[in-house]
Image (tube, rainbow, N blue to C red):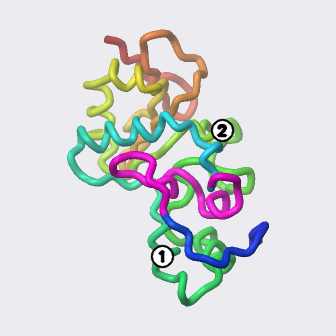
Amino acid sequence: MLLRFAKKRKRKMERIRVADNFYLDEFIDPYTYFNEVKNGLEQIDQSLFEIAQKVRDLHGYPIVINNWWEFYRDNLKKLSCNDIVDRIEAGWGRKWSGYRPEHCPIGAEFSAHKTGQAIDMVGNGRHLFTLVKDNAQAFYELGVRRLEDPSITPTWLHIDTKEHNTQPDSIRVVDLSVATEIIRW
């Protein structure tokens, strides 16, 4: 399904910084970014910006969430915005690792991604999980409520802020159907 822009873009879009090491496009899919008010900023839980930055600071290296902007930047002079978004959505790079709009073909029906309350960070899932677990109280205070068990996400870490079967002062670790651990401090 090819999507069309609600309005034509005549000028190059600038990246919108949301944290020291992150831009809004890393949290939003390209169609939403180019069509929604404020580039989709209102679609994402903004506490995820600070959460991602804290993981990045603890990790000490860059972290990838979405990387579609590279394709946009590299092809802007050759292709229209519509063509760029169509090609990205047809398979180029990462575009669904933050907010997932209604037309997104992946993920569970009630995924925290669909409400803009989740991000998936590429990397060693166990290592990133350990960074969050070892600093659980600080991450909880930033809004983290659930993590996916790294045994099912070995190449990324899913973090979300969705209050679903959570308990005060704890972070729930889940697999595809049940909690596998409750992190307390």
91, 72: nearer the viewer:
72
**Disc 1 vs disc 2: which is toward the camera?**
1
Determine which quarter of the picture holds residue 2. Answer: bottom right
Q: Position of residue 61 (x, y in %)?
A: 23, 51
Mark 2 element type: helix
Marker disc for residue 115: 2
Along the horizontal axis of the image, is 172 left or right of 45? Answer: left
Which residue: 68% across, 36% down? 110
Q: Secondary structure at mark 1?
A: helix
Residue 159, horizontal then vertical, whole percent: 46, 36
Q: Is residue 164 visible?
A: yes
Whichever of callouts 1 and 2 sits on the residue coming sooner in the sequence is: 1
Q: Identify the mark at residue 73; answer none if there is no mark.
A: 1
Residue shown at 44% from the left, 31% from the top: 147
Whether tag 1 and tag 2 are in contact, CB under 8 A, the answer is no
Specify few, some or many for label 2: CA neighbours under 10 Å numbering under 14, 14-19, or 20 or more.
Answer: some
Q: CA distance from mark 1 to mark 2?
A: 27 Å
- Identify the image quadrant of the N terminus: bottom right
